Amino acid sequence: MSERKQLQTIESTPFQSPSQQNVQGWERIGSLAGGVVMVGKGLRRGGVFGLVQVALGGVALARGITGHSSAKSLLEKSRRDMHHVRTKIEQASAELRNLKATADAAGRRPKTTAEDTNLPGHQD
């Protein structure tokens, strides 16, 4: 009897970080098309400026092919970080409002005086 072993895919290794696609749809198609145009124009132009255009077109092509943009990842990470900071500030603000309300309520309570402590039923 023969047993078939099933192959298991390895999602990522310790030395690789899983690259998630963060460029989809029209944005990805636009990167591909723009990259092809820029590479073509850069090759026809030649010289230093043509080389720069080819390099930028290559970056756009790579972005369209892989569906991943490192620049977009950094922007998304900073947006998440800012949202996290904003949430913490809002929580601190709510706590401060609660403390103020508690302090105001404590300030409005009648204060006990020495005469109040001599009332019948009050024990020290």
Image (cartoon, rainbow, N blue to C red):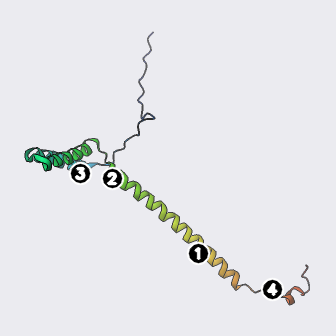
Residue 79: give x, y in percent of width and height: 40, 59
Percent position (x, y) of residue 7? Answer: 41, 24
Q: Secondary structure at mark 3?
A: helix
**Mark 1 → mark 3, Cα distance in angstroms:** 46 Å
Of the numbered discs in the image, which one, if any, rests on residue 26? 3
Kindly identify the amino acid type of the residue bearing the numbered disc 3. Answer: Trp
104 in relation to 89, above or below: below
Q: CA distance from mark 1 to mark 4?
A: 26 Å
At label 4, the amino acid type is Thr
Does label 1 or label 4 sit earlier along the sequence?
1
To which residue does mark 2 refer? 72
Find disc 4 in the rendering and name its residue: 112
Q: Name the residue tied to disc 1.
A: 97
Q: Earlier in the sequence, mark 4 or mark 2?
A: 2
Left/right of residue 29 with respect to residue 108 in the rendered view: left
Mark 1 and mark 2 in contact? Answer it, CB < 8 Å: no
N-terminal of the pair, mark 2 or mark 3, is 3
User: For the point 43% across and 19% down, which residue is it?
Assistant: 5
Residue 110 placement (x, y as % from top left): 75, 86
First along the sequence among labels 1 and 2:
2
Q: CA distance from mark 4 to mark 3?
A: 72 Å
Question: Please, which residue is most extreme toward the left here?
Answer: 44
Mark 4 residue crowding within 10 angstroms, few (<14) / some (14–19) / many (20+):
few
Amino acid type shown at disc 2: Lys
Tag 3 or tag 1, which sits nearer the N-term? 3
CA distance separating discs 1 and 2: 37 Å
